[in-house]
Image (cartoon, helix red, strand yellow):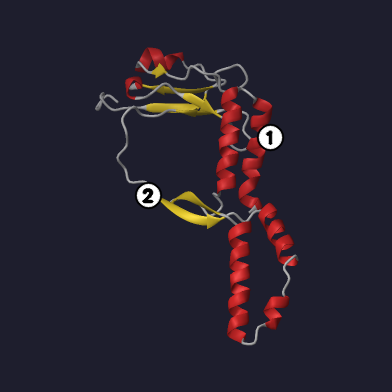
Amino acid sequence: MRKHPECGVIITGDFNQLRDNFMKTHYRFVQVVNVVTRGQAILDKIWTNMEEVYTPPVTISELGSSDHNMVLLKPKAKNSVDTGCVTRLTVRCMGPKEKATFSMALSAIKWEPLFRLDSCADQYSYYQTVICNLMEICFPTKIVTRHTADKPWVTDWFRDLVRKRQRAHMSGDLNQAKILRNKVNRAPFET
């Protein structure tokens, strides 16, 4: 730092046992975390000499089995790095409820008209029409967004689970946030 005093430095970590006053006195660093990170204490800190470049940090729920909240520090300037693209896809809703409805509807079909048809082509056409109509009714389509960088296990259900966990954490419902955190952690292995 003596050769390049204008360089930006960020030091992060769990400062539970460390006396960190020397950062302020010797290096003129500023501690920017002002929200609790574990229980009612600020144990995880971010020291920097360029605090004006960042928005005030926020905490988000724990990662994995950690009992410390994560601290998110975002730059004020927008990044122009290409991070992939978002695509829209049309998919069919094929959850357990929809599959059960389809199964019940399929078992209720009267196939006698199919057997009365003379040609194989007519039978196939009738069969295809019945099945396609059932699929349109039982498995409705919806438009979903996907990102090119998404992992295969990042599904709509998984995204919804993460959103619920974040909402619970931000609203202060820590018990629900922990339950949802555990579900999020197990989700990639259950798909």
**Lower position in the chain sequence, tag 1 or tag 2:** 2
User: Residue at label 1?
Assistant: 179
For this rendering, which residue is in front, 11 or 99?
99
For this rendering, which residue is in front, 149 or 90?
90
For the question of whether residue 57 can be seen, the reply is: yes
In the rendered structure, the answer to whether residue 30 lies left or right of residue 142 reads left
In the rendered structure, the answer to whether residue 49 lies left or right of residue 97 reads left
Q: Are marks 1 and 2 in contact (CB under 8 Å)?
A: no
Q: Amino acid at mark 1?
A: Ile
How dense is the environment of label 2, judged by Cα within 10 Å: few (below 14), some, or many (20 and up)?
Answer: few
Residue 29, numbered circle: none
Q: Is 158 situated above or below 165?
A: below
Q: CA distance from mark 1 to mark 2?
A: 32 Å
Q: Residue 23: x percent and y percent?
A: 41, 17
For the question of whether residue 68 can be seen, the reply is: no
How dense is the environment of label 1, judged by Cα within 10 Å: few (below 14), some, or many (20 and up)?
Answer: few
Q: Quadrant of the C terminus?
A: bottom right
Q: Residue 65: x percent and y percent?
A: 64, 36
User: Residue at label 2?
Assistant: 84
Q: Residue 54: x percent and y percent?
A: 36, 24
